[in-house]
Structures are given as structure tokens and as C-alpha cells.
Amino acid sequence: MIHAVSLALWVLALFAVFEASRALKLGVVGALAATLLVGLHPAQVEAVTWATGRKDILALGFSALAVVFHCRAEEPFDRHRLASLAAFAAAALSKTSALPLPLVLLAADVFVLRRDWRRSLLGLAPFVLAAAALGAFTIWIWSDAEMTRELSLGQRIGLVLATLSHDLATAVFPSTVSPLYPIHREGSFSVTELALGPLALGALSVAAWRSGSAQARFGVVAFVLLLLPVSNVIPLYFQWQDRYLSLPLWPLALIAGAGIDFVSRAKGPRWPAWAMIAALAGLLGARTAQYAGRWRDATTLFGHAAATHPESFYAWLNLGHARMREGHLEGGLSAYSHSIDAANLGLGHDARFRALLLIDERDRHITPSRADELVARFHALRGDPDRLRELAGDLAVAGYRRAVMLTLDYSLAQSPIPNDALERAAAVQLERGNEWLADYYLSRLPRPPVLPSLVQRVQNQADAGAPEDVNAP
């Protein structure tokens, strides 16, 4: 039912996009092309597939309605202008990425409708005031909820340039669309990532101005304006998301629609324009259908994210969560280990420890589960090697094994103990009958043991074949 409602709203939003494209003086063929490009793009899959994406549908639909009513307005404060203001308010309340819309409407007046900009500013003054107030409130919310990051000026500039490159590449060639992308925490990017977007935007701008097309010029300006909230001028924690492109895709589609309009109006047969529409819609539709299949369940979706962007910490973390919910504990453990390789964050360490606790509880029939309590304790003690050893002792008494060895790994990594002490610890555990713990200490010994009981233990293992490492992921 949720998906059906979202799909119905999406169709209505695309109808509004078509009407807005026509209001911006695109022909029927160009407006249809622009609408199909917006509606069939893989970046829109999340908006239609997941309930949380409905805000993108509403923002696009209300923004398009605001454009329609604005183009019909003849006086600064007539009924069409008031309807446009109401649609803008609805779009901005649906999603704050619609806040630059007043400037987009001004650009429409200047480039397409050829209205006096001073008179346009008068009519758009309430829009600008509302956008400024909502924008300030939004920035406060982002900061209070820790949705932004602190970066140096140089890192910010690099992130903005790389974001432009990423978004343009995703819009034009959506081969690696994903629900999650890596977070570049140091703000370091390759020369290609920094230069590709600005060069592509510069080339597009030159082509738009040389074409003489009012819609193409408007499209370039509107794309930049609608990209501003998600351009990382204010660095966002999740720097890139496909859904950030939902609204800026429309101006880019207008540019393509203007080009197809030009072809359709040229002398001669009109089939080349329709062939272009069919080709673009077919390619995008096929890719969208393929990508939509990845959203059938969380394991498939985050498995796709981890495969396409293996350096994404949150892709692996969410894959681990999905596998754990399915009862695939070893698969979850492996995903959590990959998340730690991608980024050394506490969430990954805690999740891996929880997975080991649950595996121990399953294999050694430990009930009731104490995973929540023990994870909280591990989290608090992870930087204290001495208290980690105390935790390992308590875990061993409670019957855990793999969690014991991981806890000792963290302790020994921070505060190594001498080889002789390791060997003595192994001997003590062997005498107590804890062969598994004796073997753990022996595995951390960089030289052969010298104590007779341990020498015999190693010899017996060599004769029987090396035991399986129970601490392996």
C-alpha cells in the first residue's frame, strides 16, 4: 500500500513537471522528454520505493506547481502568485532542498519569460523572506543534530568541487547509483574528482549560451541554484546521496528537452526527435528497473552498496545489521569486519563484538542473552587495556570464548605483555583445562614456547594438524 501511494504521487508529480516544462515554453516533445528523463532516472528509485523518500516526491511536485502558477501570474500579488507561494511553502516544508526556488523563479522571469527583474523581485519578496527564515532554521537543526561537519576552508572547497563532479557524473551516467556512499572524512580527492565537475559545468554553460536557447540557459542556472543546499557549502555528514539529485535533475532534463525540441522543430521528418526520446527513456528505464530490483530487501540493497562502494563504512555496517536480522551471524560478523577496514569507527567495533557474543551464545547455549549489557561495557572500556582484561575474565567465567579472545586482542594491541608472561599465561590456562585459551596465548607468542607442557602441546597439535582458529571471522 505504501509503495502504491508513492507511485501514484510520483505520477502526479511528473504530470506537474510536464506542465511546468510547458509553462517554461518547451514544446510538447521537449517537455515530454524532460519529464521522462526526470521520472525514469535511477536516482529517483529511492523516492518511489521507500516510504522515507516520499518527501522528495512532494518536493518535486510542489516545486513544479510553484513554477506553473508563477508563470501564469501577471501581477506581483494576484491569485496565481499566491498559489505559487503556497506551493513553494509546501515544497520547502516537504524538503529543504526546495529553498532556492525563489531564485529559480527569478531566473525563469529573466531568461524565459522576459519579465522585468525589478517587478519580479517585488512579487517574489515574500518567497525570499520565507526561504531565508526556513534556511536559517534548517541550518540550526542540522548543526544541533550533528548532521554537518567541521572542515577547513580548503577542505570545503575540495568537497564542493568533488560533489559537483559526483552529481553530474551520476546524473549523466548512473552506473554506480547506491543508497550509501563513502564519506571522505579528510576531504582529500583526486585531481579528476576536483576538476571533472567544474569543467563539465563550464562546457555545458558555454554550449547553453551559444545555443541561444532560453530554456538551456535557465536550466544551467536553475541546476546550480537547486544544487546549492546539498553542494556541501555547509559540509553534510552524509556528503552524497542519490536523493539529493531528485530536484536538480529537472533543470538538467530541461536542457536535454530543449535540445530535443530543436531537433523536432527542424525541417524534415520528426522521427529523429522521437527516436532520441525512445533511446534515452529506454536506457534510463532499463537501468532503473535493474536498480529497483536491488531494493527488494535490506540485505540485497546494502550488499549492492558494499559491492559498488567497498570503502563505504555505512554500507558494510548496514549489511551487517541486515544479515544479523536474518539470523546469518557469521555473515554479519564478516560485514562488520569490513566496515572497520573501511573506517575505524566505534560503531563497527561494537557491532562486531555483539556479533561474536551472539555466536558464542548460540554455539555454547548461553541463556539468557547478555549481549546488550556486555556491548555497553565493552564500549565504555575499549580504551582501557587493564579493564578489558577484567572483562575478558568475566566473559570466560560466563562461558564466552570468541568474545573473550577479541577483548584480549584489543587489550594486547594497546598494552602488549612480554613473551615470558604470554607463555606463563598459556601454561596456567592449560593446567586449568582451558586449552582454547592456552592456544590463544600461544598464537600470540612470536617464538616457539620453552615450557615443557607447552612444547608438548605444540608438538601434539603439529602431529594432529593445526586446529581451526575459532577467532577467525
Image (cartoon, helix red, strand yellow):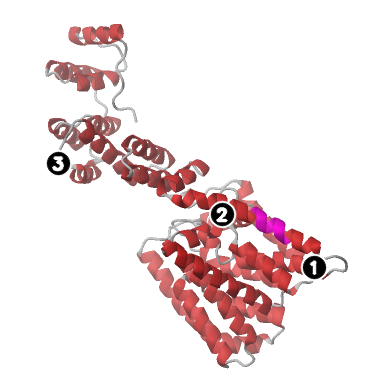
Q: Earlier in the sequence, mark 2 or mark 1?
A: 2
**Disc sitting over residue 3 in the figure:** none
Question: Magenta span covers which residues?
Answer: 277-283
Q: Which mark is residue 368?
A: 3
Q: Position of residue 68 (x, y in %)?
A: 61, 81
- Vertical arrangement, residue 260 with respect to residue 75, above or below: above
Circle 1 crowding by C-alpha within 10 Å: few under 14, some 14–19, many from 20: many
Q: Residue at label 2? A: 158
Residue 184 seen? no
Q: Nearer the viewer, mark 3 or mark 1?
A: 1
Tag 1, which secondary structure? helix
Instruction: Rate crowding at label 3 as few (under 14), some (14 to 19) or many (20 or more) other CA atoms within 10 Å.
Output: few
Of the pair 282 and 80, the residue shown nearer to us? 282
Dot 3 falls on a residue whose secondary structure is loop
Residue at point 31% right, 22% down? Answer: 469
The verdict on residue 391 being magenta is no
Amino acid type of the residue that numbered disc 3 sits on in the rendered structure: Pro
CA separation in Å, label 2 and label 1: 40 Å
Q: Position of residue 281 (x, y in %)?
A: 66, 58
* Figure quadrant of the N terminus: bottom left
Mark 2: which secondary structure?
helix
In this view of the protein, can residue 395 be seen by the observer?
yes
Q: From the viewer's perspective, is the residue at label 2 or at label 3 nearer?
A: 3
Q: For the residue carrying disc 2, how many other residues have a C-alpha within 10 Å: few (<14), some (14-19), or many (20+)?
A: many
Residue drawn at point x = 33 percent, y = 38 percent: 328
In reply to whether residue 278 is colored magenta, the answer given is yes
Find residue 202 and report its image quarter.
bottom right
At label 1, the amino acid type is Ser
The amino acid beneath tag 2 is: Gly
